[in-house]
Image (tube, grey):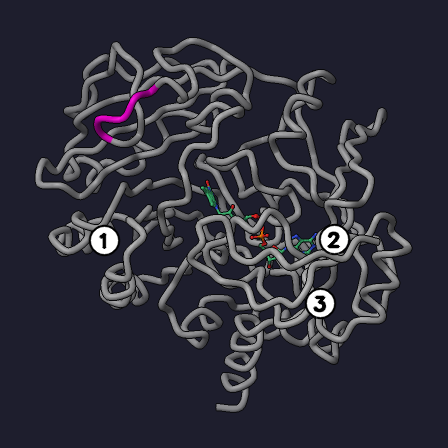
Amino acid sequence: MTVTDPIRHNWAGNQQFSAVRCIRPQSLAEAQAVIADTSRIRPIGTAHSFSPLADTSQVQLSLAGLPREIEIEADSNEVWVSAAVTYGDLAPVLMEHGRALHNLASLPHISVAGACATGTHGSGDRLGNLATAVTGMRLIRADGRLVEIAGAELAAEVVALGCLGAVTHLRLATERFYEVAQVVFDDLPRARLVDSLDEIFGAATSVSVFTTWDESERCQVWLKQRCDVTSSWPQTSWLGARQRTTPAHPLPDHDPINCTAQLGEPGPWFDRLPHFQMAFTPSSGDEIQAEYLLPRDMASQAIQAIEGIRAIVHPILHATEIRSVAADDLWLSPNYERPTIGIHFTWHKTNAVYDVLPIIDELLAPLGARPHWGKVTTFTPEMIVRGYPRFDQFAKRVRELDPEGKFSNSMTDALMGAAMRDRVT
Ligand SMILES: Cc1cc2nc3c(=O)[nH]c(=O)nc-3n(C[C@H](O)[C@H](O)[C@H](O)COP(=O)(O)OP(=O)(O)OC[C@H]3O[C@@H](n4cnc5c(N)ncnc54)[C@H](O)[C@@H]3O)c2cc1C
């Protein structure tokens, strides 16, 4: 077992961690023993969350010291991965075996366990978030027991914010290897986005719309189409937008050299679904991210609401990305039981963000927005908890499985407290 200084801050540096040390067990038995013997401990992945979710006041538990495993089951083609494996580690191995995942987020450097614990997503009307690929998991409970979960129980356990135990392995559904081609359209009027949302997000397997909310009132649309799906691209001129004939970067005036290939050139799923190539880290951490996950039928209204305050949003924003995510049945998934449109903001790293977020909250909370678990939010814990019909049941499960609050931190304590107060009032 290795005991080190704690990881001091998250990837972006907007969260300073208060842990006193980090423990990296080298075996499952060591991990079980340290969890059983420690009063406050919290699993950490690659610390990419912008929210304080990965913090703890005592011991960080990194599972990166456990043997790295990626094992494809011969009969089912499902893949078991150890918790610290990243999507960047996993994708080439799946490709070697002629397999693929259903989707990816924008960044391959995050751990599979950390991504699934927060309901991390890519885009696609018919594609669930990354946690929906989970068909089994092994985790260590607060008392040190190693348990295996499958079937109906997964709904409560997959998106669990690190509160139900330390996940050591995940079993993921895979599909036959597929190729994807992508094209980019410039200058879609934002008014058309509002009017033609279903047409736009239905135009390809995975669609992302970028805008800076500038006065041009234009968006850029990235369409990614599976090559095994028979349908054609929209015409070169579509809804007032025009198809690019040179590669694009999601941010205006940035060099597209590290972006995945466009112009309709087919390539492996993992080299098209993210906007940036696997070997490239798309930004330096000089940013803060926030995202509001809205019921799809509220999305046009939400976009119009942001349009109304674009004068305060645009000056402190790198870019907004709008994506769609299919509904699922995972209790704490931001996509729980509703098709979703995510309105994401990559902000400059400035405190002014925290003045603008409450204004956006006021506009989007009444539309049913749920904030992304891994990004910053100024929603109160009560507002967050009320967005999840099964939060109360989740809190009950946490109390049963971790009665001493071993895996909790200040953020999860606040959520559990809000759930409790909600029951009493
Ligand atoms: C540049 C950048 C791009 C991003 N792009 C996207 C995107 O496209 N889509 C999107 O939805 N999100 C995106 N995110 C957010 C990111 O996907 C989430 O914050 C994700 O949780 C990060 O994974 P991680 O491994 O760093 O987890 P951490 O931040 O380390 O931890 C997150 C949570 O997972 C829990 N956890 C971690 N490991 C385990 C384990 N083994 N067992 C139990 N619980 C565990 C932690 O306790 C914590 O609660 C992005 C973040 C960054 C920095």
Residue 17 in the image: above or below residue 422: above
For this view, does 342 lie left or right of residue 316? right
Q: Main secondary structure of the magenta part?
A: loop
Which stretch did the figure color magenta? 252-256
Q: In percent of the image, x 65 and y 68: which residue is there? A: 20
Q: Would you identify the image quadrant in which residue 407 lies?
A: bottom right
Residue 254, magenta (yes or no):
yes
Q: In percent of the image, x 69 and y 23: which residue is there? A: 94
Q: Is label 2's Cβ within 8 Å of ligand 1?
A: yes
For this view, does 16 lie left or right of residue 377? right
The image position of residue 293, as x and y in percent, is: 40, 53
Residue nearer the viewer, 344 or 52 = 52
- Any part of residue 42 in sight: yes
Name the residue that disc number 1 marks: 301
For the view shown, which residue lies furthest in the front direction?
5
The image position of residue 127, as x and y in percent, is: 51, 36
Q: Which mark is residue 41?
A: 3
Which amino acid type is shown beneath numbered disc 1? Gln
* Mark 3 Cα shell of 10 Å, populated few (<14), some (14-19), many (≥20): many
Disc 2 versus disc 1: nearer the observer: 2
The image position of residue 302, as x and y in percent, is: 25, 54
